[in-house]
């Protein structure tokens, strides 16, 4: 290549993932940002069913433990002990409770262990619901630390003159489960989990694969903790989303997996929900400050991709990180999209209960959204005690979980560092 020349990079739609099939490209002007035709008279996008769920959170293993955690709190938050946190202004993080001989925090085996258990849960759940193994299965992995704690060790080895390679932490679980389709890592910060769901759905809708297993996983690493501390996003106390006294995030480890299947359209057991559409944008005011119009674009694109009007959305699982500027930008974005209707839509955040699960945030909060649609019950926004006056008209689902008419559609929003915004729309399975 001559000097000054640049290799042209192939991109996929508005998301920039390389080497996916041409059906996902942005060459057609009549395609929504989620990758499906939106012009009048075009065919309905191929349905994507959510058939399996698996999760390990600070509340324990499984969806029942997740639901109890988000309803009542009580997660496993404790001081970080496997690296020095002095000078960060924070010392507490969330950990998956030590069960079944899990490798200790800080060990190379912890991330793949959590990943493997979440994958096994989700696949077993799908099998129980009658969703059989598919001939072509993809794995889409969301994480901010694809090599686990081995990353830091690899850098130290290089500094000492070693040239040993660093194997991705997701490789052993992927090999154990024997996925025979694409294996795609997604790493756009806190929005990675939601973006991975969109990629998995697009793989199915385009016919590349019949099943996509999407998993978000992250542990507590020194790199992430110190990096977030340098951006002054870590809270010395707990997460208090939308509160007047909010002061930042508290990070947690988590592994959360969803099995996405091409909808068989037969009389098999109904799925948990349907993934109707997704959208994304990349726009920020600063590295750790999302732009309201960027978040609004992601939400609008998701609704367009899903062919779901704003009036059909009956629940929003907000990113709700509890940062001074992020919460303002997100609620402003939702008001841009929903207008006066927003006051009648329950908006709740899960991070006071879950902690901020980093690359897994989008997947575990998608599970919360799916469970909300399936159960017809809205979880509260824990940690919210002093609602600012400008948001007093909004429904943050305060207090205990409450029954509601199951909404036709639910929305989950994720915002990552650098302005990476992703929204995903789920539809209720039952009529």
Image: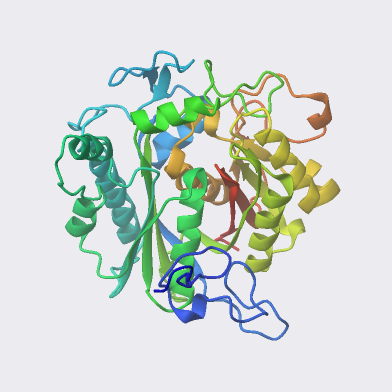
Residue 417 in the image: x percent, y percent?
55, 42
Query: How many numbered marks does the figure carry?
Result: 0
Work out whether residue 193 or residue 256 is closer to the camera in this orientation and state it: 193
Work out whether residue 144 or residue 411 is closer to the camera in this orientation and state it: 144
Residue 241 in the image: x percent, y percent?
63, 28
Residue 84 is left or right of residue 328, and the answer is: left
Outermost residue, right side: 340
Q: Please name the residue shown 33% across and 66% down the image.
A: 138
- Above or below: residue 61 compared with residue 310: above
Colour scheme in use? rainbow
Residue 423 is left or right of residue 60, and the answer is: right
- Above or below: residue 100 compared with residue 386: below
Residue 80 in the image: x percent, y percent?
35, 19
Which image quadrant: the N terminus? bottom left
Which image quadrant: the C terminus? bottom right
Q: Quadrant of residue 135?
A: bottom left
Outermost residue, bottom side: 41
Residue 379 in the image: x percent, y percent?
59, 36
Q: Please name the residue shown 56% across and 61% down the image.
A: 430
Work out whether residue 431 or residue 11 is closer to the camera in this orientation and state it: 11
- Above or below: residue 265 compared with residue 355: below
Whether residue 268 is visible to the viewer of this picture, yes or no, is yes
Q: Please name the residue shown 48% across and 66% down the image.
A: 201
- Above or below: residue 424 compared with residue 327: below
Whether residue 396 is visible to the viewer of this picture, yes or no, is no
């Amino acid at each position: 290549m001559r000097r000054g020349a640049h290799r042209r990079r192939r991109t996929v739609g508005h998301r920039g993932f390389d080497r996916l099939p041409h059906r996902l490209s942005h060459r057609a002007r009549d395609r929504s940002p989620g990758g499906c035709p939106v012009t009048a008279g075009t065919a309905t996008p191929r349905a994507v069913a959510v058939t399996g769920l698996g999760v390990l959170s600070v509340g324990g293993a499984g969806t029942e433990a997740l639901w109890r955690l988000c309803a009542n709190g009580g997660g496993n938050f404790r001081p970080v002990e496997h690296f020095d946190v002095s000078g960060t202004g924070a010392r507490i993080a969330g950990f998956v409770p030590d069960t079944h001989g899990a490798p200790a925090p800080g060990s190379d085996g912890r991330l793949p262990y959590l990943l493997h258990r979440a994958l096994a849960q989700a696949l077993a759940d799908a099998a129980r619901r009658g969703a059989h193994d598919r001939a072509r299965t993809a794995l889409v992995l969301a994480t901010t630390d694809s090599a686990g704690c081995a990353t830091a060790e690899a850098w130290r080895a290089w500094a000492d003159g070693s040239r040993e390679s660093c194997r991705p932490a997701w490789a052993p679980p992927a090999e154990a489960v024997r996925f025979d389709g694409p294996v795609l890592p997604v790493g756009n910060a806190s929005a990675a989990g939601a973006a991975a769901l969109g990629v998995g759905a697009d793989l199915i809708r385009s016919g590349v694969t019949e099943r996509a297993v999407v998993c978000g996983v992250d542990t507590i690493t020194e790199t992430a903790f110190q990096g977030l501390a340098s951006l002054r996003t870590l809270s010395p106390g707990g997460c208090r989303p939308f509160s007047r006294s909010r002061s930042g995030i508290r990070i947690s480890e988590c592994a959360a997996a969803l099995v996405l299947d091409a909808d068989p359209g037969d009389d098999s057991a109904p799925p948990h929900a349907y993934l109707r559409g997704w959208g994304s944008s990349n726009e920020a005011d600063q590295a750790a400050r999302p732009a309201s119009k960027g978040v609004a674009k992601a939400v609008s694109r998701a609704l367009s991709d899903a062919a779901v009007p704003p009036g059909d959305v009956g629940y929003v699982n907000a990113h709700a990180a509890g940062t001074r500027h992020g919460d303002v930008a997100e609620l402003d974005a939702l008001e841009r999209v929903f207008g006066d209707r927003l006051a009648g839509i329950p908006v709740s955040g899960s991070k006071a209960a879950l902690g901020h699960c980093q690359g897994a945030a989008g997947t575990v909060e998608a599970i919360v959204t799916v469970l909300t649609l399936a159960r017809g019950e809205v979880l509260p926004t824990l940690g919210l005690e002093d609602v600012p006056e400008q948001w007093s008209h909004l429904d943050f689902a305060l207090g205990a979980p409450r029954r509601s008419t199951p909404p036709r559609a639910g929305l989950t929003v994720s915002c990552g560092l650098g302005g990476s915004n992703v929204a995903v729309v789920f539809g209720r399975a039952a009529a």
